[in-house]
Image (tube, helix red, strand yellow):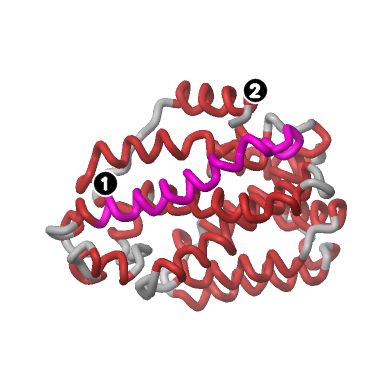
Amino acid sequence: MDEAGRLVMETVRAADPDRYVSALYAPEDKRAALFALYGFNAEIAGVRDRIREPLPGEVRLQWWRDAIDAGGGEAVAGNPPAEALTAAIAAYDLPRQAFDNYLEARIFDLYDDPMPSRTDLEGYCGETASTVIQLAALILDREQAPRFAALAGHAGCAQAITGLLLLMPRHRARGQCFVPADVLAAAGSSPESFLAEKGGAAAGSVVAAMTALAREHLAAFREEAPLLPAALRPAYLPLALTGAYLDRIERLGARAASEMPRMPLWQRHWLTYRRAARGW
């Protein structure tokens, strides 16, 4: 692994420790590309945290589009994450359109517009978390990965919705609401009410509804997960933690709107190891 690769690996270790650990279970010759993909995901997911207005964020996303379209070279010189990603795209012939769709979906992160519907949320998850899983699977085994595209869809939705629940306190603090408007309405809430102190009177119902949606996709994933070949397993390993995270969120109930649940590091490592060794 070159210097750019090592820098990206350390970025993933700090920003996305669960995916970092999952990549360690991949064959050694695949890890640099996985870290490049996960480093890109961490970089884009963190854009909103580094800006005050949406326009600079859109400019940053466009820079990544241009860098990927250019295929590396001078366009990414001096930017280790971009150097590593474009090298991985070239080495594994990863579809550039998937990255373009991913970046388009991430524009939503830059604004405070409410998520319109459950369908929109699932589409957002599909273009972001599911895409990352599918791209990781292509790196691991290009021949077998396409057979499990639908499974990646459910896996990404379960993982992303759980992630949104975990980050709900941070999102609410800056005026963002990823909970779909139809889910809020069914729970007796609204974007304005949910962004109020502690999530409003219906916070418990909102958290329960989002948790149920994540569990629905997790159940669909688990139904077919035993068919996953061992070669693709590392791409799906972050799902090993999803059920345990949802358990903690459910125990918090309404408090999950303003309090982030924690899971001990040893437990996260154990759950990941168990799935890496045995599958689902």
CA gap, disc 2 to disc 1?
A: 32 Å
The answer to which image quadrant residue 26 occupies is top right
Q: Is residue 104 above or below residue 269?
A: below
- Give the mark, 2 or 1, whose residue is nearer the N terminus: 1
Residue 277, labelled with which disc? 2
Type of amino acid under label 2: Ala
Residue farthest to the left?
201
> Image point 34% across, 54% down: which residue?
210
Where's the N terminus, which quadrant? top right
Which residue is at 78% across, 32% downward?
Answer: 27
The image shows residue 178 at horizontal and vertical percentages of 37, 63
What's the magenta region? 206-234
Residue at figure coordinates x 31%, y 43% from the top left: 260
Q: Residue at x 48, y 28 (%)?
A: 268
Overall secondary structure of the magenta stretch? helix
Regarding mark 1 in the picture, which secondary structure is present there? helix
Task: Quarter of the image for the C terminus: give it.
Answer: top right
| Residue 177 picture quarter | bottom left
Check if residue 211 falls in the magenta segment.
yes
- The residue pinned by badge 1 equals 256
Amino acid marked by disc 1: Ala
Residue 245: image location, x then y, percent: 40, 38
User: On the rendered structure, is 183 left or right of 23?
Assistant: left
The kind of secondary structure element at disc 2 is helix
